[in-house]
Amino acid sequence: MPDYNYDVIIAGGGPAGSSAAAHLAQMGYKVAVFEKEKFPRDHVGESLIPFCYGHLEKLGVLEQIKKIAVRKPGINFVSADSEHRTTWCFASTLKDPSQLSYHMLRSTFDKMLLDNAKRKGAAVFEEFKIVDVDLTSPEKAVVTVENTSGQREVHRSRFLIDATGQNTFLAAKVGKKVSYPGLDRVALFSHWSGNNFDRALQNGLIKIVYLGGEKIGWCWMIPVGKDLLSIGVTLNNSYVKQKKSEYSHYGAEWKTHLYEDEIRSSAEIQSIIGNGQRTHDVIVMGDYSYSLTKRYDTNFAIIGDAAAFLDPIFSSGIYVAFESAERTSLAIQQLFETSTTAGLAALENHYTHMDKSYRLLEKFIRLFYKPEVMNFALVGDPERLMYHKFEAAYTIFHNLLAGDFFTNADKYCDFIDEIEKNNWFQKYVTLAHSKELQFGLDVCDETAHEVYGDLDESLLDLPQIVH
Ligand SMILES: Cc1cc2nc3c(=O)[nH]c(=O)nc-3n(C[C@H](O)[C@H](O)[C@H](O)COP(=O)(O)OP(=O)(O)OC[C@H]3O[C@@H](n4cnc5c(N)ncnc54)[C@H](O)[C@@H]3O)c2cc1C
């Protein structure tokens, strides 16, 4: 007789871990989630893409999220000099309720998802860190956890899911972490209040400001509350290293000064910040963009950020985490209910599919850093398209921005290759560009009244105020 305490143990209770726990518990398995933090806890990554909608519905949290989220109708891309901007409104191509996506504080969102996993039947242990695992037996995972007082317990399960995010708990034990060349970045962010929301932010749009030159990065502004703005900057690693020595006289505070200087160097952000106040310390996420060489076997699977992470320009992380959690749960069901061979085949199939999506995402991200080929801030308003042959291309880009990474990934890759080869969009911009074409807010205006409509700020776990 097997001596398991659980069918599946999940390391990490972020969106990947909590959604996998909900799926598996709903399938009737005995699941335990060990999460090292006490929720609510702060986390970066506050903007959802429309393709998350179906997952929120399946997980049964759609009504709850409406109360804690600002509605997001699209993206406002702004050029580095803030002279050009284009709004990509999801309603241009999506004709169902998912066209109004969401921004939310991750503290509240992640807690909602973890509570949901508990409600579905998963056992959730917060402030328990997974510190060791033995995977030598192919049909068992022996997991050692430690609580905040340093006490250890050993648990055994038929299967282990690593959903430890950028901590990548299993990476070193089962394979190697490989970086994406040229996509190494550092991000710094905080929240602000008392700012001057412009029309785009009032309409619930995320703003992405391209930063060219040696920074090779971008800034984001996300309205996460009626008077709460998430402002972040993503910069190339080598630029940050150079700045670290320039800012050494600030001692431990160098990152805070770098953050403030970088965001204020953007005219767009400076005018929106106005007399606003930063509401908490600057959070730094370093040196990311990687994938793992081995992500599954007969007794484990790695999902969400723990498996791979790519530059978050297109807000893809949570959607990818949801997809990988659901698909992995289905493969585990095959493994448990048929045979190890069938289960392994299902896992292999799933990860091959994931790889195609990562390849597409990587191409899409690299395109963002080639504004000479495709400048998202400068292409103009799709509603006033003057050249019909670009309609299809606009639709394809809208679908990609909405999150269509898992169907037809190969076709989308071919499309991006074509765009790069023929410089299509650059030709279009040269032909059609005029001041009048730079603003595409009209479509999003139609939904503006709904943006803050359902939000109940008394439910938010607001970040701690800086003194
Ligand atoms: C700068 C930046 C901006 C981003 N912006 C967006 C965005 O706008 N939209 C979007 O969708 N995504 C965004 N992302 C990505 C998004 O944050 C992640 O993809 C998402 O959080 C992945 O979820 P996850 O569950 O895999 O990992 P996480 O959310 O990181 O959860 C992992 C959990 O595991 C726990 N843990 C770690 N180690 C252990 C251990 N040993 N034992 C137990 N528990 C452990 C952690 O405490 C954590 O709670 C952004 C990321 C960055 C870096």
Image: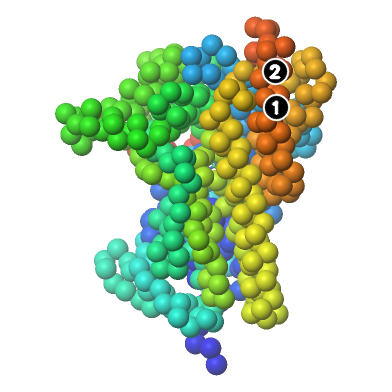
Residue in view at x 54 percent, y 75 percent = 299
Q: CA distance from mark 2 to mark 1?
A: 9 Å
Q: In the rendered structure, which amino acid carries the disc numbered 1?
A: Asn
Labelled pair 2, 1 in contact (Cβ < 8 Å): yes
Q: Which mark is residue 427?
A: 2
Which image quadrant: the N terminus? bottom right
Q: Which mark is residue 74?
A: none
Q: Residue furthest right?
A: 388
- Dot 1 crowding, Cα within 10 Å, few <14, some 14–19, many 20+: few
Work out whether mark 2 precedes mark 1 in sequence or the reverse, and give the earlier one.
1
> Relative to the observer, which residue lies in front, 194 or 260?
260
- Relative vertical location of residue 318 with respect to residue 457 in this rendering, above or below: below
Which image quadrant: the C terminus? top left
> Relative to the observer, which residue lies in front, 65 or 415?
415
Q: Quadrant of residue 394?
A: top right
Q: Position of residue 453 (x, y in %)?
A: 63, 29
Q: In the rendered structure, which amino acid carries the disc numbered 2?
A: Lys
Q: Nearer the viewer, mark 2 or mark 1?
A: 1
Q: Is mark 2 within 8 Å of ligand 1?
A: no
Residue in view at x 56 percent, y 28 percent = 370
Q: Is mark 1 within 8 Å of ligand 1?
A: no
> Relative to the observer, which residue lies in front, 343 or 336?
343
Q: Position of residue 445 (x, y in %)?
A: 68, 19
- Relative vertical location of residue 396 with respect to residue 263 in this rendering, above or below: below
- Dot 2 crowding, Cα within 10 Å, few <14, some 14–19, many 20+: few
Residue in view at x 54 percent, y 11 percent = 83
Q: Residue furthest top?
A: 435
- Would residue 389 be found to the left or right of residue 366 on screen? right
